């Protein structure tokens, strides 16, 4: 059975590309790639880009790109999707070139964005991909683990969870059910790929006008989490959740609002799952300390 290896890139539509360019370089610490006038590419490593921000009024996630590892695995995965009745189709050579991949397949997600499947990126950056000088440490944890994770907002929670497991083939990590008031629960379910980052995708039912609640990027140096939080506050960027720690993926992180309104979590210390010893749990709290909420993710 072919399986998703990692979440390799994201594409979002944004109304203010200049704001994203400086948000990436000056606050988060990404590199900035030249992708033409109508988009901004944010670089996390030696890939040509990992976040592609395209001009558009949507201000939301549009595509999530998954690496299958090999062309043979990609073809097998697409065949298996079709056997399950999923309406997956091959994108044009031009679109594949835009994404810096050889062949590209796509499938609509029930939550309103599109999954893209490929095997390996092309067009690596000659200089190794310089990141922003604001970083103290060596950058971001990517490689086989992918760029981080996304939390798209469920529309039909139980059915959406099944879709991620049964159609996309993601592995179940764990779940959090926190009682916010008597009988009222905040609930999220977490999924990982074959390479084991605790979650590449989670979903939960939250009130939200956006498809994407947040994306997460992980630093290699813990100090970069605090330094990014300081830079964000100094720049007047809204902090959604203060510094804190999640009990399931063990991520030390904070959340702020991106120029497009959805959130970004910047973290350190996330768990990589070892299937031999991993025992999924249902945790009773979203955070075991910190993450004090200042505002909702989207105004
Ligand atoms: Fe997260």
Image (cartoon, grey):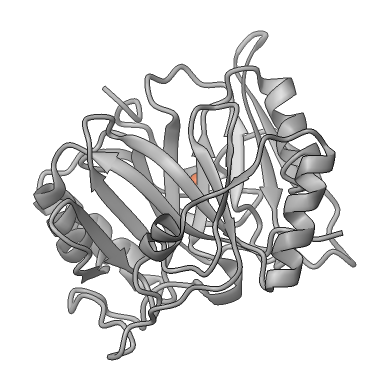
* 167 relative to 159, above or below: below
Q: Can you tell which quarter of the image residue 276 is in?
A: bottom right
Query: Which residue is farthest bottom?
Result: 127
Foreground residue among 180 and 208: 208
Image quarter where the C terminus lies is top left
Q: Position of residue 244 (x, y in %)?
A: 45, 49
Q: Can you tell which quarter of the image residue 176 is in?
A: top right
Inspect this view and state whether residue 202 appears: yes
* 233 relative to 155, above or below: below
Foreground residue among 199 and 245: 199
Residue at (38%, 49%) from the top-left corner? 11
Q: Position of residue 209 (x, y in %)?
A: 37, 19
Foreground residue among 111 and 138: 111
Q: Position of residue 14 (x, y in %)?
A: 23, 40
Q: Position of residue 280 (x, y in %)?
A: 82, 47
Foreground residue among 184 and 135: 135
Residue at (35%, 40%) from the top-left corner? 263
Image quarter where the N terminus lies is bottom right
């Amino acid at each position: 059975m072919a399986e998703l290896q990692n979440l390799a890139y994201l594409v979002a539509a944004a109304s203010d590309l200049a704001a994203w360019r400086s948000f990436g370089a000056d606050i988060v610490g990404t590199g900035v790639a030249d992708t033409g006038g109508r988009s901004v590419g944010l670089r996390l490593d030696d890939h040509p880009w990992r976040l592609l921000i395209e001009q558009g009024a949507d201000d939301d996630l549009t595509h999530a790109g998954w690496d299958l590892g090999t062309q043979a695995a990609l073809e097998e995965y697409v065949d298996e999707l079709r056997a399950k009745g999923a309406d997956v189709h091959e994108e044009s050579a031009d679109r594949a070139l835009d994404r810096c991949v050889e062949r590209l397949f796509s499938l609509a997600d029930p939550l309103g964005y599109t999954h893209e499947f490929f095997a390996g990126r092309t067009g690596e950056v000659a200089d190794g991909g310089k990141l922003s000088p604001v970083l103290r440490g060596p950058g971001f944890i990517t490689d086989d683990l992918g760029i981080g994770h996304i939390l798209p907002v469920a529309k039909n929670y139980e059915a959406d969870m099944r879709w991620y497991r049964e159609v996309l083939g993601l592995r179940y990590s764990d779940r959090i059910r926190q009682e916010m008031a008597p009988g009222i629960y905040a609930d999220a379910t977490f999924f990982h790929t074959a390479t084991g980052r605790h979650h590449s995708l989670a979903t939960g039912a939250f009130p939200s006008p956006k498809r994407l609640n947040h994306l997460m990027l992980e630093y290699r140096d813990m100090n970069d989490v605090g330094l990014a939080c300081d830079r964000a506050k100094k720049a007047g960027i809204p902090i959604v959740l203060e510094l804190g720690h999640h009990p399931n993926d063990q991520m030390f992180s904070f959340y702020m609002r991106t120029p497009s309104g959805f959130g970004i979590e910047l973290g350190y210390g996330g768990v990589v799952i070892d299937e031999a010893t991993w025992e999924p749990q249902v945790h009773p709290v979203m955070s075991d300390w910190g993450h004090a909420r200042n505002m909702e993710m989207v105004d």
